[in-house]
Amino acid sequence: MTNDEKIAIITSFQDNPLVHSLTCSVNSLHENLVPKVYIDEVMLVCPTCKTVQLIDDEFIRLLGELDTRQREFGRSREALMKQHRCVKEF
Ligand SMILES: [Zn+2]
């Protein structure tokens, strides 16, 4: 995975309203973490307090899978609700 690919995965995950965004380890009420490259490594930075967290490739891969699955689930749920004119939340 290139750094650009990693940043794309993390950014998509953080923008996905169907998952719980990655938040600051100091205070989860801080702004959502953003991916930044430091010394050729992608790290997560809190825009509020500038705390830096490491993130490994395996975890980024998991985020990517979760992001894709939740987006697919969101789309099929939307299609299903349209099809059946279902108003009940599930
Ligand atoms: Zn913070």
Image (cartoon, rainbow, N blue to C red):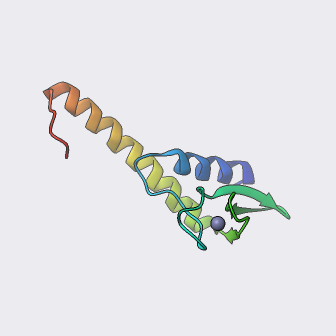
Q: Quadrant of residue 3?
A: bottom right
**Residue 73 % position (x, y):** 33, 44
Q: Which residue is farthest bottom?
A: 26
Using the rendered view, name the quadrant where residue 23 is placed.
Answer: bottom right
Considering only vertical position in the picture, is 87 above or below 1? above
Residue, far right: 39
Which quadrant is home to the N terminus? bottom right
The picture places residue 14, in percent across and down from the top left corner, at 55, 51
Q: Residue at x 67, y 51 (%)?
A: 7
In the drawing, does residue 51 fall left or right of residue 58? Answer: right
Tell me residue 13's x, y (percent): 53, 50
Instruction: Pick the residue in front: 32 or 49.
Output: 49
Which x, y percent locates residue 39?
A: 85, 64
In this figure, what is the number of numbered marks?
A: 0
Residue at 44% x, 57% y is 20
Vertical arrangement, residue 52 with respect to residue 9, above or below? below
Residue at position x 73%, y 64% from top?
50
The residue lying toward the viewer, choosing from 40 and 16, is: 16
The quadrant holding residue 43 is bottom right
Tell me: residue 30, above or below residue 4.
Answer: below
Ligand 1 image-quadrant field: bottom right
